[in-house]
Structure formats: C-alpha cells, structure tokens
Amino acid sequence: MIQAMNISKSFNGKKVLDKITMEARDGEIFGLLGPSGAGKTTLIRVLTGQLQFEEGDAFVMGKSVKELKGKDKKQFGIMMDDFGLYDRLTCYQNLRVFADVYGVNDEDIYEVLKEVRLEGAEKKEASKLSKGMKERLRLARAFLHRPKVLFLDEPTSGLDPQTANEIHDMILKRKNDGCIIFLTTHNMHEAEKLCDRLVLLNDGHIVEEGAPQELCLRYDHQKRIQVVMKDGRTRDYSFDEKSGEEIGRIIGSGNLLTIHSKEPTLETVFMELTGRRLEV
Ligand SMILES: Nc1ncnc2c1ncn2[C@@H]1O[C@H](COP(=O)(O)OP(=O)(O)O)[C@@H](O)[C@H]1O
Ligand SMILES: [Mg+2]
C-alpha cells in the first residue's frame, strides 16, 4: 500500500504540493493525472524517499518514507527521467549494473529482456537504441528485481501509439503478477486504459479522485444518449421513458447503426474543475 497524508512541499517558498492525501491499494494501478507542472514528479520523488518535505508523512508498504533504508528501496522499482541509461553500455550491461546492486542473476536478466521484447538486442549499445527500445529498457530496469511496488513517471510520454501500447501491455502484466503500480501521466486515454483509480492533480492540489469511469459519470450533467442511424441521421436523446420508447422503435426497425451515452471525458472533467487542459 502507498499512502500520502497531508504532504506539503515547497521550492523556494512556492508550494508545489499542498496537503496531498491519497492511498494506492494493493493490486491496483493508481494514477496521478495532471498537466505539466502539476507536481507529479515531485510527489513520486517524495514517495520514493528521494526528496524531503515540510509537512505530513507518507508510507509505502507500511514504512514511513522518512525512514526508508537501502533494503526497503530494493522493494521498489522506479522509472523516471532522473534514472537514465548508460549510453556506452549495451542493453545487457545496463541491466547487469543494477543486477549487481539487487542480487539478480544472469538468467533473470535475459528473462526480463525477453519480457520487454529486447531479446536479440542485448549486445546493442544503449545510444543506438530507438526511443521505444530505450523506454522498454528503462522499464526492464525498473522491474528487473521483481519489486512489489512500481513507480512509473510518465512511462509513455513522447512515444508513438504502437510503442505506448506495448508498454501498456507490459505494465498490465506487472499488475497481473501482483505488483502495485503508481503511475503518472498527462494523457487521459492512458489513465482511462490503465488506472483502477486515480487522482486529478492541478497546481499541487488534488481536485478529484475515483475510478476513471466513475469520475466521468459524476460530471455527466447532460445525461444524453447519441443514436446514429443507418440512413445517416444522428439524434440525441435524454435518459427518460419517452426516449427509451423512441430508441426501442429505431432498434426494432433495424435502422440502428450505433448508440452511445455521452458522458464527458477525463479531459472535460479536468477542464470543468480547473479551467485548464491536461495537454498543451
Ligand atoms: N528541484 C526543483 N527546484 C525548484 N522548483 C522545482 C523543482 N522541481 C520541481 N519544481 C517545480 O515544481 C512544480 C511541479 O513540478 P513537477 O513535479 O516536475 O511537475 P510535473 O511532474 O507534474 O510536470 C513546477 O512548478 C516545477 O517548476
Ligand atoms: Mg514530471
């Protein structure tokens, strides 16, 4: 479990995290969704014991992050920009460096390389990898030692959709293996796809929290249904009995092409709450 209780953090007198309270439960992917500058990376640095803070406390697996020792940190896997690769080392050598720290054997290194689909590239220098391959190697490094907790800071930022999807599959596999995953993103589609629960973060404040669908339904003020018919017509209906009868008639006539409820996206919810967009 990962718990933050009233965490506040300032840089040069400016509050960048303001009384953050949240809890990520075992077995779930917990998301922090917010635009650039919201405080996502800062919160990950706090939760992984890399950064001191003025107020509150945070606990990972029952231990205060103020008291984390080296051996506790070995239970974490961290993927963030500060944790780069050694450009002159090969894929295998990059993992070997960390394997030595974590007591991981060669067999497991090759197993992890296979899991991130870098088998065959183990002798390739990191500097010669494509961006997608680099990201996969960074992910491999984060879970090389089979940590119980994974912190992923914008794991697909700047990647093409296909590579992002591959990384999503790898993250979901870690969840199925029982890992608790704390993930940050500014991409609502990623949040919707991966996160069991999330918080919306803006300017160091949590503005909402819940499961992605639950959040969208909570802010569905219009409650409309859109029906597209085979003859090209589109109609909007409200959630009432009369609409139900009309929609029933369309379905009965065989003229229905698609039918969707029109709840807002996470981006629209974020806009309503903050007046800002997630991506600029
Ligand atoms: N080491 C630092 N020194 C001063 N300001 C910082 C530092 N790290 C982050 N900040 C500021 O804190 C705010 C939140 O940054 P960050 O956590 O990186 O946001 P995000 O990851 O959501 O983009 C930003 O205004 C950023 O400029
Ligand atoms: Mg960041």
Image (spheres, rainbow, N blue to C red):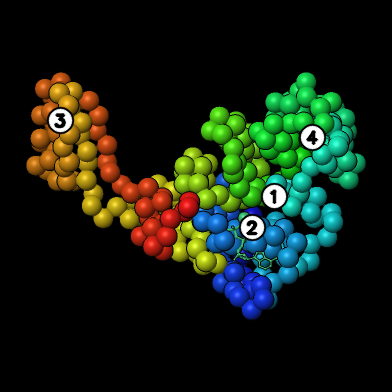
**Disc 1/disc 2 C-alpha distance (Å):** 8 Å
In the rendered structure, which disc, 3 or 1, sits on the residue that comes first in sequence? Answer: 1
Q: Which residue is mark 3?
A: 233
In the rendered structure, which disc, 1 or 2, sits on the residue that comes first in sequence? Answer: 2
In the rendered structure, which disc, 1 or 4, sits on the residue that comes first in sequence? Answer: 1
Q: Which residue is mark 1?
A: 80
Horizontal and vertical percent position of residue 203: 52, 66
Say whether residue 34 is left or right of residue 229. right
**275 versus 197 height, above or below:** below
How many residues crowd mark 3 within 10 Å: few (<14), some (14–19), many (20+)?
few
Amino acid marked by disc 1: Met
Label 1 near label 3: C-beta < 8 Å?
Answer: no
Secondary structure type for disc 3 = loop
Secondary structure type for disc 2 = helix
Q: 192 or 173, which lies in front?
A: 192
Q: Is mark 4 within 8 Å of ligand 2?
A: no
**Disc 2/disc 4 C-alpha distance (Å):** 24 Å
In the rendered structure, which disc, 3 or 2, sits on the residue that comes first in sequence? Answer: 2
Residue 126 badge: 4
